[in-house]
Image (cartoon, grey):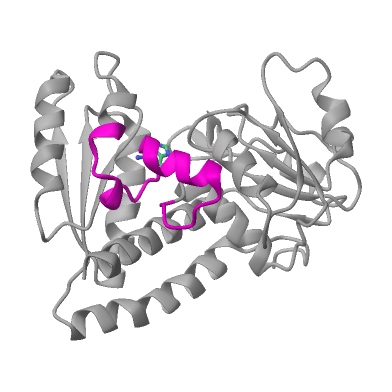
Amino acid sequence: MQAANVVDGRAIAAQIQQELAARVARLKSRGVVPGLAFVRVGEDPASKVYVGRKEKACAELGIVSETHVLPEKTSEKELLALIGQFNSAAHLHGILVQAPLPKHIRESVVFATVLPTKDVDGFHPVNVGKLMLGDATGFKPCTPAGVVELLVRSGVKTDGAEVVILGRGNIVGKPMAAMLCQKGKAANATVTICHSATRDIKAHCLRADILVAAIGVAHFVKADMVKPGAVIMDVGVNRVPDATSKTGTKLVGDVDFANVQPIAGKITPNPGGVGPMTIAMLLQNTVRAAEMAA
Ligand code: GUN
């Protein structure tokens, strides 16, 4: 039994998937089956796991997905040509190129090649721009969108809240800040982004009503960095040694959950918090892309 302040990301994601099932049924009654292409380049072990989970979630919802696994040595030109084919394929409503890509391929060029209307990751410059402008016609990146949805569905008010985000990456930190400082519902927060050059991260964290950890360091956020009652969203996925597990490793978040949970107002577990929401938001973006195309 989880403590009452633990936010159950799996249950909230399941609820969203149920809501999406009705939209998929409506699309199918009009002869439209949502379609999503996954592209994975090379054999990054974490990417294999992530894409596998996304494929399974698509299948459960009735989204038809196809996964294209390309060898590590694939050239940027070859990858762009494949994306070009997907851009013009009518049965595909979404395209997801799993990051990270091999070093010889420029991620920014790849993301900019995906048609903005099929960019269910929300990484195309047009969609990034729309997010900055508060234009809701774009696609929002799945992980920060999932965090916002978790806050909303667990009754956390962001209006006027002090939000501190650890991490300034393009996939989580920066879009997270853009979403939460926007004027509007589930936003209106005062946002601080901390990163590797921040002078006193602990002082910033201690001010936070809502702390989003996306820094990629196992158990970085300790109990003495958290204001009692603060809401903690743990985005981190870090593999650490674990003698008790079969694989000799386990996944942990950026937050020292065991010690932070007792003082937090609300906290996401890891796994079972933000991760399932990333997938739910990908499904939501794909269903929306299919509705827009229909
Ligand atoms: N790598 C880590 N997170 C993501 C994501 O949300 N989308 C893609 N395409 N790659 C990722």
* Residue 265, percent from left and from top: 83, 56
Q: Is residue 258 above or below residue 100?
A: below
In-front residue for pair 40/124: 124
Residue at point 33%, 37% (across, down): 47
Going by the image, does 191 lie left or right of 66? right
* Residue 104, percent from left and from top: 24, 13
Check if residue 15 falls in the magenta segment.
Answer: no
Quadrant of ligand 1 in image: top left
Check if residue 123 falls in the magenta segment.
Answer: yes
Quarter the C terminus occupies:
bottom left
Q: Quadrant of residue 286?
A: bottom left
Q: Quadrant of residue 257?
A: top right
The answer, for residue 74, to whether it is visible in the render is no
Residue at point 11%, 61% (across, down): 91
Going by the image, does 256 lie left or right of 237? right
Q: Quadrant of residue 191?
A: top right
* Residue 57, percent from left and from top: 33, 62
Quarter the N terminus occupies:
bottom right
* Residue 10, percent from left and from top: 53, 64
The answer, for residue 78, to whether it is visible in the render is yes
In-front residue for pair 294/232: 294
Going by the image, does 108 lie left or right of 203? left
Q: Which residue extends farthest right? A: 228
The residue segment tinted magenta is 111-139
Q: Is residue 98 above or below residue 90?
A: above
Going by the image, does 192 lie left or right of 283? right
Numbered disc total: 0
